[in-house]
């Protein structure tokens, strides 16, 4: 439906009738004017067409000419009258035909308007129905919107609650991370302490190198210190080593006394004095790797791991120049691994422990007697155990599952190796006990062979 039809006025029909009446009135006035004009013209023409009366004395020719002229005038008047009526007819058709056409147009317009009015009514009814439907839908939509608003408000409240919970969880996670970091630090400290305890149980030096005979002046004090040290009377051993230091003039012997003094202080957990004694030994004998080793472990116990690493690296560098160095290098490198753990460089510590294991295995192969083999195998067990501790710590601290699994596998493999090494130690101990029993049986058999057998009469 067009917009013109929708905007059509309600009083179109009275307006059309009014226009038609006006047109008809104009046409009637025009026709009346034409008739009046025709009547006037007809009267004038009739007056003019009155034939002239014959005059006396006219000839026949003049009479005939007058008669012809009268006939011509009559025909001319009739022609004029005909033309007037033709003009009146043309005027009539010129007036009434447009009126008729206009009337037809108005009738068509009326019919169209009536159709449009009917269509308008139907459309209005249809639009009313649609309006009702739209009202219902709008009401339903408003209800849904209200429900959605309620749901949105509820979701907003839930979201706010969730955000509050998330904030609380973040705070708790941060606290947990702090506790975890603190716990990891404590666990690392415990593991480092355990590793250090493992290193403490390692023999620092072999017996000959540890207890130098010294000169005649310091020999008694050194021997007394050795006895006290082996009896784990470290305070008494320290007193004897002090006397050895005071009474010795030889720089090498005095450095050995300072070295033993440092170890005594180390066992007494007096690490500043242990460090001072090790530094004194280094000043007297700077080429001895053992003194640097003692300085490194003293720094390590004071948690100065960087200085400890430097000192232990110097000990390893100087030991590389010595002969028969595998066992001491194993000890030095394993001590360096513990210091690296102190700086949380566990990956490097693991590599150093692998090196220490290789040195210790070489030392076991080079063992010349059963006692050396037992001691070096015990050292290997301790290094394996330290290696297990390092890999367990790495398994707990690394991020990726692959690294965790790899370190756990390394720890399990080294634990098996440590158990195998312990079994080897037990087997070697059994061999040593059997050999010692054999050595005890041989003198008894010799004594029994030298004795006089009893006589039959004595029986």
Image (spheres, rainbow, N blue to C red):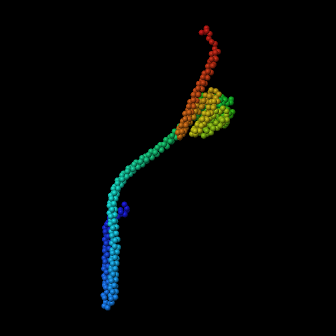
Q: Is residue 164 above or below residue 297?
A: below
Q: Position of residue 402 (x, y in %)?
A: 54, 39
- In this view, the residue in front, 145 or 90, is 90
Point 61% across, 8% down: residue: 457
Dividing the image into 4 quarters, which one contains the C terminus? Answer: top right
Dividing the image into 4 quarters, which one contains the N terminus? Answer: bottom left
- In this view, the residue in front, 384 or 316, is 384
Q: Is residue 42 above or below residue 294?
A: below
Hey, which quadrant is residue 36 in on the image? bottom left
Q: Is residue 227 visible?
A: no
Farthest front residue? 60
Q: Position of residue 422 (x, y in %)?
A: 57, 29
Hey, which quadrant is residue 122 in on the image? bottom left
Point 64% across, 15% down: residue: 449
Point 61% across, 38% down: residue: 308
Q: Disc count in the image?
A: 0
Q: Position of residue 419 (x, y in %)?
A: 56, 30
Q: Is residue 122 above or below residue 407?
A: below
Q: Position of residue 52 (x, y in %)?
A: 31, 87
Q: Is residue 137 visible?
A: yes
């Amino acid at each position: 439906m067009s917009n013109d039809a929708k905007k059509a006025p309600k009083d179109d029909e009275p307006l059309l009738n009014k226009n038609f009446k006006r047109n008809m009135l104009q046409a009637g006035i025009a026709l009346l004017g034409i008739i009046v004009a025709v009547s006037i013209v007809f009267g004038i023409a009739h007056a003019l067409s009155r034939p002239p009366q014959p005059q006396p004395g006219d000839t026949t020719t003049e009479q005939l000419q007058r008669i012809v002229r009268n006939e011509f005038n009559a025909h001319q008047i009739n022609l004029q009258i005909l033309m007037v009526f033709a003009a009146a007819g043309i005027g009539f058709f010129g007036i009434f035909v447009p009126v008729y056409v206009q009337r037809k147009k108005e009738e068509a317009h009326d019919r169209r308007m009536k159709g449009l009015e009917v269509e308008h009514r139907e459309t209005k009814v249809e639009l009313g129905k649609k309006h009702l439907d739209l009202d219902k839908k709008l009401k339903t939509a408003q209800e849904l919107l209200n429900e959605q608003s309620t749901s949105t408000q509820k979701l907003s409240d839930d979201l706010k609650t969730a955000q509050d919970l998330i904030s609380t969880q973040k705070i708790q996670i941060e606290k947990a991370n702090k506790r975890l970091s603190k716990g990891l630090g404590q666990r690392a400290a415990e593991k480092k302490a355990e590793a250090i305890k493992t290193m403490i149980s390692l023999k620092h030096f072999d017996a000959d190198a540890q207890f130098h005979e010294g000169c005649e002046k310091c020999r008694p004090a050194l021997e007394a210190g050795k006895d006290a040290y082996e009896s784990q009377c470290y305070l008494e051993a320290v007193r004897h080593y002090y006397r050895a230091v005071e009474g010795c003039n030889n720089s090498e012997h005095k450095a050995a006394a300072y070295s033993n003094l440092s170890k005594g202080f180390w066992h007494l957990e007096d690490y500043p004095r242990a460090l001072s004694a090790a530094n004194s030994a280094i000043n007297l004998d700077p080429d001895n790797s053992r003194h640097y080793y003692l300085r490194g472990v003293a720094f390590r116990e004071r948690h100065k791991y960087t200085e400890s690493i430097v000192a232990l690296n110097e000990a390893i560098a100087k030991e590389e120049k010595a002969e028969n160095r595998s066992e001491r290098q194993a000890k030095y490198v394993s001590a360096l691994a513990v210091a690296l753990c102190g700086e949380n460089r566990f990956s490097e510590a693991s590599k150093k422990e692998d090196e220490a294991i290789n040195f210790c295995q070489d030392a076991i192969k080079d063992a010349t007697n059963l006692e050396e083999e037992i001691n070096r195998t015990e050292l290997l067990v301790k290094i394996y155990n330290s290696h297990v501790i390092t890999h367990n710590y790495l398994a707990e601290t690394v991020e990726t599952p692959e690294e965790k699994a790899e370190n756990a596998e390394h720890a399990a493999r080294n634990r098996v190796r440590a158990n195998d090494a312990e079994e080897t130690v037990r087997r070697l101990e059994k061999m040593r006990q059997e050999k010692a029993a054999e050595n005890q049986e041989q003198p008894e058999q010799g004594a029994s062979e030298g004795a006089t057998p009893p006589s039959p009469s004595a029986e």
